Image (cartoon, rainbow, N blue to C red):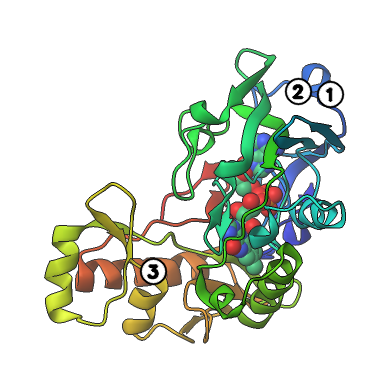
Amino acid sequence: MQSLTSLHSFGLSCTAQAFIRMNQPTDLHSSLNLKSSAFYILGEGSNTVFLEDYQGTVIRPAFMGVDLKHTDTHYLLKVGAGENWHQLVLWCMQNQIYGLENLALIPGSVGAAPIQNIGAYGVEIEQFIHQVDFYDLNKQCHKSLRRQSCEFAYRDSVFKNDLADKVVITSVTFAIPKIWQAVEHYGELRELSEPSAMDIFNKVIEVRQSKLPDPKKIGNAGSFFKNPIISLEQFHLLQKTWPSMPSYALDNIAKVKVPAAWLIDTLGFKGKKIGGIACHPNQPLVLTNDGSGTGEELLALARSIQSAVSKEFSIELENEVRLIGKNGPVVL
Ligand SMILES: Cc1cc2nc3c(=O)[nH]c(=O)nc-3n(C[C@H](O)[C@H](O)[C@H](O)COP(=O)(O)OP(=O)(O)OC[C@H]3O[C@@H](n4cnc5c(N)ncnc54)[C@H](O)[C@@H]3O)c2cc1C
């Protein structure tokens, strides 16, 4: 039996039957006999909530290493899946490799970054991904996918769909252009005038630290829900009742993204609690665990938000966080 409480940032009190840390991709050949038993691949647990005792094996890919190559135009960085994401961003900054600074301080591992195509402050990681190397658990062999085949979309990729739970990502190769261009059009970054990459890095850290609850102090998994994408037609209809509803245009499609935080806030959920689980008083998209919360309480609060949003706006909120029950994934 292995406690999972400190292995996921939401920190619910629960266990797994077993825990295996894999240090080398070759361990995947020798020690995995997963066809017969339930398993869950876990990075740093910042996008996973274990709701109750998990009746399977939790596997932590801990493949490390950073290998830097150059082409005329790009830095090619091949990074082990077990490396910490923010430490990689920091390493890049220290080595004058600029481009990842908008994604500073996102918790989690490098291996998980392509899975939900992590994004923040106007940048998504897909634009820097060259190749993802993985072990195919069904075919029991190593394979690679180039960026074009990863089916990246907003908080989405082939690894969350067709390949979900069928592969272990072993490394990610990033192609970072040698000519740097600032992305400064988003939120508080607009306050900066002709910023350097280091200015953006520092600002992102400052804003994130002031806005988001630190999982080391209060359990949380970042944004609990995805920002919904709705048709322009539905948006214009909703605007008649809710003229102040914000939206972000999406390239090339007749749809808009609506901030889930605005929907949740408008319905008065900020600060609402069920037992030890709360909707954060400043960041309503973040649900928190004061240390005494349970999986049932979390589901109850998340479902009450989801059903209120559906009733009032006819918008179906989807969870961004992966919810794991005793036998595996749980649908909200
Ligand atoms: C405070 C806070 C702020 C956050 N802010 C952001 C943000 O701004 N933008 C953003 O995009 N996300 C954000 N997140 C979410 C989270 O940081 C990312 O989703 C991160 O990529 C998760 O990494 P992890 O290693 O913790 O993943 P885990 O939670 O361990 O795993 C997530 C998923 O990836 C799978 N997985 C993990 N590693 C592997 C592997 N090697 N091979 C195959 N499958 C694997 C798991 O099975 C699971 O399905 C935030 C989270 C927190 C707690």
The residue depicted at 72 percent of the width and 46 percent of the height is: 43
Q: Nearer the viewer, residue 23 or 145?
A: 145
10 Å crowding of disc 1: few (<14), some (14-19), many (20+): few
- Could you tell whether 331 is left or right of 68 in the image? left
Rendering coords of residue 167 (x, y %): 62, 27
2 or 3: tag closer to the N-terminus: 2
Give the alpha-carbon distance from disc 2 to disc 1, as whole Å.
Answer: 7 Å
**Residue at the spot x=62%, y=77% of the render?**
192
What's the distance in space between the residues labelled 3 and 1, CA to CA? 41 Å
Question: What residue is rendered at 86% in x and 28% in y?
Answer: 24
Residue indicated by mark 2: 32
* Among numbered discs 3 and 1, the one appearing first in the sequence: 1
Find numbered disc 3 in the image and state the secondary structure of the residue it sits on.
helix
**Mark 2 vs mark 3, CA separation in Å:** 39 Å
Residue type at mark 3 is Ala
Q: Is residue 310 left or right of residue 56?
A: left
Residue that mark 1 sits on:
27
